[in-house]
Amino acid sequence: MRADYHMHTEFSFDSNATLHAQLQAAIERELEEICLTDHYEPAYPGLPLWQVDLGARAEALAAADLAPLREKITVRQGAEVGLLDLPGQRAHIHQLVEDHKLDFVIASCHLCQGEDPYYTDFFRKRTRGEAFSLYISELVDLVKTIDDFSVVGHIDFPTKGCPYEDKMLRYTDAPDAIDDLFRYVIDRGKGIEVNTSIFRALGKDTLDLAWLKRYKELGGEIITIGSDAHKPQDVGYAWDSAISLIREAGFGYIATFRQMQPVFHKIS
């Protein structure tokens, strides 16, 4: 199953990609299934537009002009929820999933102690290891603020803003925090993703296999692949490299989702 489970469209604040363009790109790259995961940030400071109109997206996807594309690929409805420590967030996200009958939710952290790791300022006065460790620790705390999620997104997100020569998250950067995150996720029947946008940040299609193997070692089974594409040319990015890394880490299956339940597909 060739599936891209992390992509954005014009319904995300930071993307201009139309639904038509994203679906067409997915078909051209011979993907069998995609999930639309536009940003839903309950209260990102100064950016109220990060609240995707999921109803409008569903209506746009159902439009007659997209019918020929919908016939060629399975399209699931999802969201990438940016986690913040907010009162009522648990109930709010639960209602979001229920109201829009979402198939899949990515729980992501885009702010760490009020700073965005996408930018190099996050690393100011912090070593590479300190920055990654702080981010993972924050992610552990934030994931506990909601129940309705499918996978934790891009645990190596600070790679995108890392100014150091070695940009890669390594298991040795934060072993205790990574173990805490994985145990929490596994105990609740949730999963993680391999986010291939990190490959673009690294300039090579790789990651530290130690944390991926540790997830497997602790009992992790649910794993998805997502390109985090905000434009058509990145849809399905480095999918083959991702599946090779997942296989090398010892996994026999990847997951897709339907109605918030994982569907497992054997890696050939």
Image (tube, grey):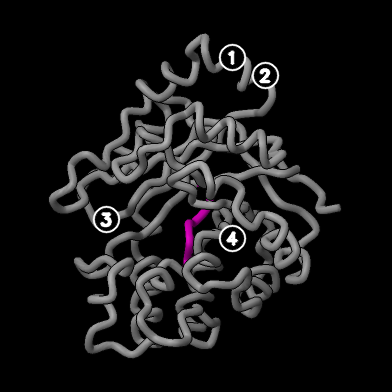
- For marks 2 and 4, give the CA distance: 27 Å
Horizontal and vertical percent for residue 231? 46, 44
- Disc 1 packing (10 Å; few <14; some 14–19; many ≥20): few
Disc 3 target residue: 84
The reply to whether dot 3 and dot 1 touch (C-beta < 8 Å) is: no
Q: CA distance from mark 3 to mark 1?
A: 37 Å
Q: Disc 4 residue type?
A: Val
Nearer the observer, 223 or 236: 236
Cα distance, mark 3 to mark 2?
37 Å
Q: Main secondary structure of the magenta part?
A: loop
* Numbered mark located on residue 194 in the image: 4
Q: Residue at x 61, y 33 (%)?
A: 258
Q: Which residues are magenta?
A: 150-155
For label 1, the residue is 67
Q: Which residue is mark 2?
A: 71
> Image point 69% across, 39% down: which residue?
31
Residue 234 x %, y %: 53, 50
Q: Is residue 127 left or right of residue 26?
A: left
Callouts 3 and 2 close, C-beta under 8 Å: no
